[in-house]
Image (cartoon, rainbow, N blue to C red):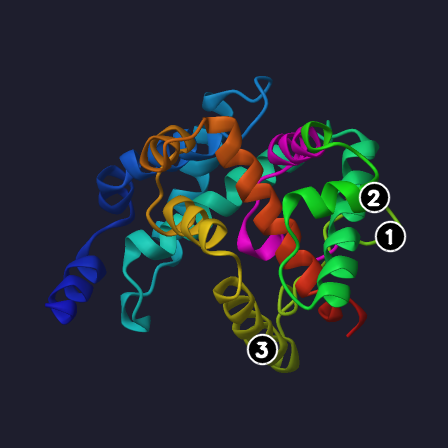
Amino acid sequence: MRHTLYAEASRCTTSELVTRHSELVKRIAYHLLCRLPPTIQIEDLVQAGMVALIEAAQKFDAGKGASFETYAGIRIRGAMIDEVRKGDWTPRSVHRNARAISEAIQLLENRLGREARESEIAAELGVDLASYHTMLQDQAFAKLQSFEELLPEAEEDEGDEFDLPGSHAGPQQQIEREHFIAALGSAIGQLPQREQLVLSLYYDEELNLKEIAAVLGVTESRISQIISQAALRLRARLSSWRSS
């Protein structure tokens, strides 16, 4: 069956691949839109995604094992995130709060030898629980949390993304990337069960916030907070990658 799919993909022209998968662009765009501020227009995401889809169709090699939809989906999502990043609208205070939360989580978990609870993180930060939830909500709208954005940001320029090992891929960098992905997978497996579930539903099952909220019986804003806290917890636990 797999070989048949590869054969079919290899016979498709660029225009045929684009036509067949244009709905994929819209699906990814709407999935991301619910995490973005109202200033972001769906048309901008779709336009960036269509360009990425065309490029993916031109470069796709069916013999390498991945399905075209998987290959194109990665490129489409990446292009949309790049489009959002062009507008640097996030206040610097939000970046500072993200760093403060990650550092608080790291200090608490090192001290306690277990996962830090929300109330404990808030106390470490010197704020009440409602204020901490607001900080998490700000993080939810500040950036798209893809798994490659979970490392700490560079201190030299708040808001700049830390380069993921392998993002400028040479042989050594690719090995580092693979090690990072393994470490990330292990760290995700050690998250609190609720955070693992929400990440799985959002990234793996591609449910939107409203759908996840319905599954868990909470509000959409609560789901945003859980995703943000999970991402910041992972950044804290993977902080050693920054120094290396």
Amino acid residing under circle 3: His
Instruction: Say which residue appears at 83% left-offset and 43% top-offset.
Output: 158
Question: Is 186 on the left-hand or right-hand side of 151?
Answer: left
Image quarter of the N terminus: bottom left
Query: Toward the viewer: 224 or 192?
Result: 192
Residue 185 magenta = no
Q: Residues within 10 Å of mark 3 (few under 14, many from 20)?
A: few
Classify mark 3: helix, strand or loop: helix
Amino acid residing under circle 1: Glu
The residue singled out by tag 2 in the image is: 158
Quadrant of the image occupied by residue 217:
top left
The residue singled out by tag 3 in the image is: 179
Image quarter of the C terminus: bottom right
Instruction: Say which residue appears at 68% left-offset and 28% top-offset.
Output: 130
For residue 205, which numbered disc appears in the image? none
Residue 133 magenta = yes
Q: How crowded is mark 1: few (under 14 residues within 10 Å), some or many (20 or more)?
A: few
**CA gap, disc 2 and disc 1:** 6 Å
Q: Against 179, is 67 above or below?
A: above
Magenta extent: 132-152
**CA gap, disc 1 and disc 3:** 23 Å
Sooner in the amino-acid sequence: mark 3 or mark 2: 2
Question: Is 141 on the left-hand or right-hand side of 123?
Answer: left
The residue singled out by tag 1 in the image is: 155
**CA gap, disc 3 and disc 2:** 26 Å
